[in-house]
Amino acid sequence: MLETAEAFGINLSFKYSDWDDEEQQYQVKETIRKEPDMIILVPENSDTSTIWYKDINTAGIPVIASNLMPDDEGFRYILTWTGPDDWEQFRRLAVEFAERMNYRGGYCIVSHIPGCSAYYARTWGIITELQRIAPSMELLAMESTSLNTRKTYQVVMHWLNKFGDNLKGIVSADDNLVQLGINKALSVKERDDIVKVANGSTRVGIRMLKEGKLDAITFQSAELDGALPIQVAIDWFNGLRVPAIKYLPIHILTRENVEEFVFNFNNPGEIDLNHLFQLIVECNESNVETFFDSIYDQFSSVGVLTVEYFRGFTIEIG
């Protein structure tokens, strides 16, 4: 987020509440008092945050909601929301999961914390998609372990004892703490035949993917999650229409593509537009063409080039 802000000359400051409602409420009030040009809010509670969005809006300050989606009322007071499309990600993950399961067999789901938006998407997104594309696959059990490694281990051990060889695959709402518990149970039971997919993508999950301890994860870059609201803010300050919802890119990572994709997804390096301006002033047509050829090569080498970045680039060119 900071790198993107600096690239476009935005003075960005951060406040951390350590997921404390009272502390975040105090920080929102303090930030409103300072009258910034914009506030980007990453709340931990969608119900409480609606009050904050309303207070910010009433103060005449534009606000972008990030990561945790507001409730219906909250959307009345924000410019836009940016974050992951969990529903579509898990539908895509279901396709990869079904292919690796040969479209048959029993599976279990370790779900997210009940009540949050991620719980519904990362549970029912995959269930409904599998019912559509792989009706021969059977959901044997699903349970939330509150993203706790030890509890996940105990639940998966129970499933392995109960379902035995009928259990062919496990879906996890988290590729870090939850997946560690899953993998520990599978190791104890020596079940290396189980197909394992999860929501990602933490460094732990990516490492397990590369080591063959996970078969597929969703791509959910923390870097892009931070950059996206800044990029949308840049559009808004430039007078462009911004959508009510702006999702992160969607992709499924496997052992086969993780090296190429994850380590090559950031925006291109710095582009020297002053050099381009000088070439135009000098009427140096051939070097101008060479400049844009090099830009094309930079863009082509990037795993994910966001629309916002490209739009910002074209604004700067203009």
Image (cartoon, grey):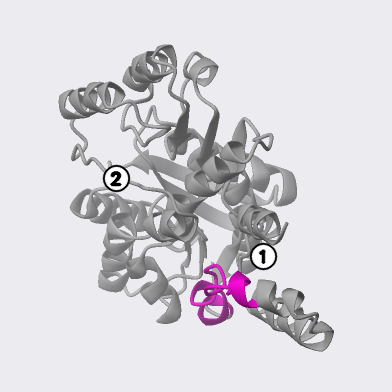
- The x, y position of residue 170, in whole percent, is 45, 57
Labels 1 and 2 touching (C-beta < 8 A): no
Given residues 58 and 158, the one toward you in this image is: 58
Q: Classify mark 1: helix, strand or loop.
A: helix
Q: Residues within 10 Å of mark 1 (few under 14, many from 20)?
A: few
Could you tell whether 77 is left or right of 93 in the image? Answer: left
Could you tell whether 20 is left or right of 156 in the image? Answer: left
Q: Nearer the viewer, mark 1 or mark 2?
A: 2
Q: Residue at x 24, y 21 (%)?
A: 29
Q: Is residue 18 above or below residue 93?
A: above
Q: How many marks?
A: 2
- The x, y position of residue 207, in whole percent, is 37, 75
Q: Is residue 190 above or below residue 140?
A: below
Given residues 41 and 4, the one toward you in this image is: 4
- Residue farthest to the right? 285
Q: Which residue type does callout 1 highlight?
A: Glu
**Residue 258 falls inside the magenta stretch:** yes
Q: Which residue is mark 2?
A: 13
Q: Which quadrant holds residue 1?
A: bottom left
Q: Which residue type does callout 2 highlight?
A: Ser
**Residue 74 falls inside the magenta stretch:** no
Which of the two discs, 1 and 2, labels the residue nearer the N terminus? 2
